[in-house]
Image (cartoon, rainbow, N blue to C red):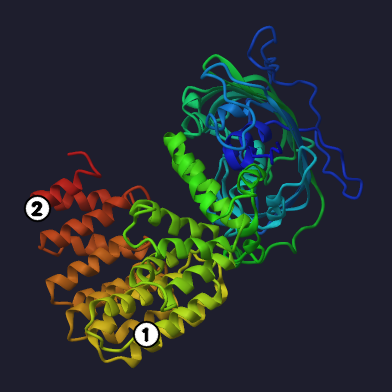
């Protein structure tokens, strides 16, 4: 059968690490002049017999203190090439007897035949540095001119490799906190991370000619040994050898793909990396790595990968690639114009299973997958069914009809129905959204179906504008002031859903202003306190800072529910103005119930320095145990970023607070 390189769909983490930690010699691009760098003739060798240990650096003057030091706004460009030849025994990655797998899985520990997988990629990496704090930089990054093939085929997600991403870099060389353009496939993220983690070069705290470090890549955590091979003051360069010694833990063993992988070990059989760095400069100049890695489970080698990677800095001017302000790039990450294409992307293996099935056959296949592989039921049965809905988009309408006509859950039990609603939203495409919004608004469906659809419509990742338009019209068409419980529930759920579709994590930026406008207008146009409270809660689901000013009048409402809901509307807002608004109105709030609601909101809010500082101040003056407990949680949860918080907690202990407050304090500090 066709193996769509399910490497990245079924074992993305594994192969992303085993393949691209590996890497290739570069062919220079004649159109770009490379930076001149010292060459090395000495390479670190794998510490496994019969290969010799790496040569010790010759006695030299005292080793320099190595640090990277990019300037604010500095840009760099690199050319990279990577290729790897991998053989994988897919019987370890696919549960036994999975339909569509023509290779029967042997007994555990015996394995089957290995499938060859060849990866080859090249391209350009562009970077721009932005000062964050001394010794730490935000880095904007993007790949361009990427050629990427798996078994001579370009995978669907390769189109997403061109979108920008960001990360943090420290002067000691460690990389962290990757953020990607919203909606790009995880396989693309893993490929990009692999390139950067391969380029990571870590320095010791003190000057040394040899040092050891613990680092992470997409395979897992490993121990690395470095040696300073040579320095050239005239060229302002140093040559470093790096050797991976061993993996301390791997993601594969923790993945749950297959019980036989739980004891899987990844062995580094050969490794040699040569790095040229500037003695004073932004980042590496060149890096070449070759590596052979194998993975063994139950005494059976199920994966082997050999490959190479090389990267070389060029003098190409890429200053126009990124904006002047880092925040402008972060805003750009929120929107990916090609994201909707992924909702129609399918997997060849699952396509073969579902190609000739109608919706009834697909449901039966889903059931069989769950029964045959209970330990992986969620992973494989659900993957199959989402793929089926993407392969046959119109099946979403048929599925909704089947569930609507099964109110007593005689064919599909309640748990299965709830899962299927979720899988429709994971399919994500236009047809899935049409099927769900029709289940909300079409009177031919039962109230139970209306409610189920409203409960899951929140989950669409990229909601289309017709969904928010239809929800708003449905809300307006529901009878105002109805005392009938189902009608009240539908109105409430509709507003909540509308707010959620405009939330920060949704990928369709174009519908958010309209959602904000509609909710604020609804808030202003009603005198009914229950509807005001419901609309405020919906604004909390929305979470945009643009509505803060619209909330102001409701903090002074005579109705406690409305005041509590006004605080709740701040819960997802990251702007410091939100915590300032909460603090201002908390000080004048007299109701214990509303004050507690306000502090619960603070606990839920994205932490800000202003909010944490206010919590430290307020916990010292309030005498109410419930308020103290919530404030302690805010202070304690932010102890790592604000170590001065410990003093506040210890001062509160001296006051001998209520036992539940003490218990909360001791979650974060020792007596």
Task: From this view, report whether residue 261 is shown above or below residue 441.
Answer: above
Using a 10 Å C-alpha cutoff, classify the residue at mark 1 as few (fewer than 14 neighbours), some (14 to 19) or many (20 or more): few
Q: Secondary structure at mark 1?
A: helix
Q: Which part of the image, by quadrant, shows the C terminus?
A: top left
Q: Which residue is located at x 37 percent, y 87 percent?
A: 522
> Which of the pair 14/209 is nearer the observer?
14
Q: Is residue 123 above or below residue 44?
A: below
Can residue 639 be seen?
yes
Mark 2 highlights which residue?
Answer: 657
Q: Is residue 569 left or right of residue 363?
A: left
Give the residue at mark 1. 550
Please report the residue visible at 65 percent of the width from the left and 50 percent of the height from the top: 70
> 461 above or below 446?
above
Please identify the quadrant where the N terminus is shown: top right
Q: Percent position (x, y) of residue 538?
A: 36, 75
Question: From the viewer's perspective, is residue 295 above or below residue 326?
Answer: above
Q: Quadrant of residue 182?
A: bottom right
Q: Quadrant of residue 99?
A: top right
Cα–Cα span, label 2 and label 1? 38 Å
Question: Which numbered disc flags the more N-terminal residue, 2 or 1?
Answer: 1
Measured as percent of width and height from the top left, residue 328 is found at 60, 68
Residue 310 visible somewhere in the drawing: no
């Amino acid at each position: 059968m066709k193996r769509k390189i399910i490497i990245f769909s079924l074992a993305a983490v594994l192969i992303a690490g085993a393949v691209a930690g590996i890497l290739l010699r570069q062919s220079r691009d004649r159109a770009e002049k490379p930076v001149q760098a010292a060459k090395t003739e000495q390479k670190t060798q794998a510490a496994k017999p019969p290969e010799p240990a790496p040569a010790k650096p010759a006695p030299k003057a005292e080793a320099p203190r190595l640090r990277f030091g990019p300037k604010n706004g500095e840009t760099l460009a690199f050319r990279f090439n990577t290729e790897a030849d991998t053989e994988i025994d897919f019987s370890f990655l696919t549960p036994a007897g999975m339909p569509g797998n023509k290779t029967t899985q042997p007994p555990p520990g015996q394995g089957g035949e290995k499938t060859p997988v060849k990866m080859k990629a090249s391209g350009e990496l562009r970077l721009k540095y932005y000062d964050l704090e001394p010794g730490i930089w935000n880095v904007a990054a993007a790949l361009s001119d990427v050629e990427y093939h798996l078994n001579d085929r370009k995978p669907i997600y390769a189109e997403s490799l061109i979108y920008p991403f960001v990360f943090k870099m420290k002067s000691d060389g460690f990389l962290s906190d990757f953020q990607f353009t919203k909606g790009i496939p995880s396989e693309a993220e893993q490929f990009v991370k692999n390139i950067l983690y391969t380029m990571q070069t870590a320095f010791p705290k003190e000057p040394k000619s040899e040092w050891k470090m613990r680092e992470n890549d997409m395979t897992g955590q490993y121990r690395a040994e470095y040696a300073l091979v040579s320095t050239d003051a005239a060229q302002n360069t140093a040559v470093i050898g790096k050797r991976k010694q061993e993996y301390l833990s791997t993601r594969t063993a923790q993945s749950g793909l297959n019980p036989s992988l739980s004891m899987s070990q990844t062995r580094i059989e050969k490794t040699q990396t040569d790095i040229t760095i500037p003695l004073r400069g932004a980042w590496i100049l060149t890096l070449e790595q070759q590596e052979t890695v194998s993975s063994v489970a139950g005494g059976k080698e199920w994966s082997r990968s050999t490959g190479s990677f090389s990267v070389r800095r060029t003098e190409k001017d890429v200053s126009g690639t990124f904006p002047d302000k880092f925040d402008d790039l972060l805003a750009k990450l929120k929107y990916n114009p090609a994201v909707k294409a992924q909702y129609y992307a399918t997997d060849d293996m699952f396509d073969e299973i579902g190609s000739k099935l109608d919706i009834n056959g697909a449901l039966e296949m889903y059931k069989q997958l769950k029964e045959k592989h209970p330990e992986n039921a969620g992973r494989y049965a659900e993957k199959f069914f989402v793929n089926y809905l993407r392969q046959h988009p119109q099946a979403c309408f048929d599925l909704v009809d089947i569930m609507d006509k099964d109110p007593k859950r005689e064919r599909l039990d309640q748990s299965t129905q709830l899962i299927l609603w979720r899988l429709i939203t994971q399919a994500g495409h236009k047809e899935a959204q049409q099927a769900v919004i029709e289940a909300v608004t079409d009177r031919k469906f039962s109230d139970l179906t209306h409610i189920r659809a409203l409960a899951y419509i929140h989950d669409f990742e990229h909601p289309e504008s017709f969904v928010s338009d239809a929800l708003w019209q449905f809300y307006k068409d529901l009878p105002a002031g109805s005392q009938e419980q189902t009608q009240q529930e539908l109105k409430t759920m509709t507003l909540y859903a509308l707010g959620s579709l405009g939330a920060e994590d949704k990928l369709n930026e174009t519908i958010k202003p309209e959602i904000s406008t509609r909710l604020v207008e609804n808030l202003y146009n009603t005198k009914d306190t229950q509807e005001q409270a419901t609309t405020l809660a919906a604004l909390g689901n929305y979470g945009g800072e643009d509505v803060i000013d619209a909330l102001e009048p409701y903090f002074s409402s005579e109705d406690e529910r409305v005041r509590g809901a006004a605080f709740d509307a701040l819960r997802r807002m990251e702007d410091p103005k939100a915590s300032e608004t909460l603090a201002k109105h908390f000080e004048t709030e007299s109701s214990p119930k509303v004050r507690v609601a306000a502090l619960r909101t603070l606990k839920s809010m994205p932490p800000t320095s202003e909010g944490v500082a206010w919590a430290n101040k307020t916990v010292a003056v309030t005498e109410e145990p419930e308020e103290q407990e919530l404030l302690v949680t805010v202070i304690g949860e932010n102890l790592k970023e604000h170590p001065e918080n410990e003093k506040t907690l210890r001062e509160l202990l001296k006051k001998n607070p209520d036992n539940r407050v003490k218990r909360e304090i001791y979650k974060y500090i020792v007596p």
